Amino acid sequence: ILNVEQSPQSLHVQEGDSTNFTCSFPSSNFYALHWYRWETAKSPEALFVMTLNGDEKKKGRISATLNTKEGYSYLYIKGSQPEDSATYLCAFSGGYNKLIFGAGTRLAVHP
Amino acid sequence: SQTIHQWPATLVQPVGSPLSLECTVEGTSNPNLYWYRQAAGRGLQLLFYSVGIGQISSEVPQNLSASRPQDRQFILSSKKLLLSDSGFYLCAWKGASSNTGELFFGEGSRLTVL
């Protein structure tokens, strides 16, 4: 059974704080690691897809790193804003056709 | 552009009743299709996926079934719902030739079984 773990489960920060979350996944049979943002009342949307060990991706104030050898990825948010409030999901792909999701990290950014 | 729709958005059903959730994709051909469920306080659990018409892979043994009668239609069903079937169901698609494997999700269907 493939296990994808995310921590913390939830996080409350103040506007302007920087924060980061962790995703751990199986280090064998790695194909890709995805990060999604899931805002309330909306559908999950992809932030990043990473495939190579050492990958770093950035989109505005959000960035992610990948270590496939040890099986972890970090998502960083610099200078959190209230609109960053969402659940952040990571998903592991060990093959081409399916993604296994973690339970997510719920982020609340307070003004 | 591609779009994905699923319905109904909300459903309240008694235990033992049947279920049918539908999902359709527009603007693409031969997509990979997926059903996920989020139970209360938990992550997204992959239920079924399909790489083509009539081809269904089941990820977990359960009370549910899936069918793909047409290329861009994916249906989640149950003959008799259980309380444990309550949850938020998401349909998703991926291009069959997509290198990134990025999923595109529908709006979701919230099922409450009473």
Image (cartoon, coloured by chain):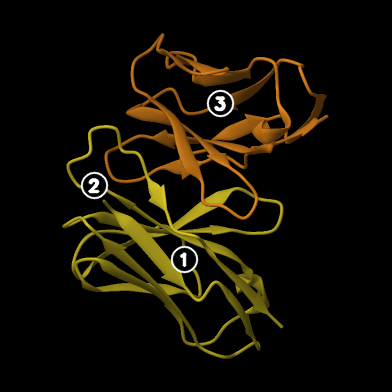
Chain colours: A orange, B yellow
Vertical side of A106 occupied by A41: above or below: below
- Quadrant housing residue A111: top right
Q: Marks 3 and 2: same chain?
A: no
Q: Nearer the viewer, mark 2 or mark 1?
A: 2
| Residue plotted at (58% across, 17% down) | A61
Q: Secondary structure at mark 1?
A: loop
| Residue plotted at (60% across, 48% down) | B43
| Residue plotted at (51% across, 88% down) | B18
Q: Are marks 1 and 3 in contact (CB under 8 Å)?
A: no
- The residue labelled by disc 2 is B95
- The residue labelled by disc 3 is A24
Q: Secondary structure at mark 3?
A: strand
The answer, for residue A4, to whether it is visible in the render is: yes
Mark 1 to mark 3: distance in Å?
A: 25 Å
Q: Which mark is residue B61?
A: 1
Which of A91 and A88 lies nearest the eye of the viewer? A88
| Residue B24 spot, x, y in % from top left | 32, 68
Vertical side of A28 occupied by A79: above or below: above
- Quadrant housing residue A57: top left
Along the horizontal axis of the image, is B110 left or right of A9?
left
| Residue plotted at (53% across, 87% down) | B80
Which of A85 and B113 lies nearest the eye of the viewer? A85
Q: Chain of mark 2?
A: B
Along the horizontal axis of the image, is B18 left or right of B55?
right
- Quadrant housing residue A93: top left
Mark 2 to mark 1: distance in Å?
A: 26 Å
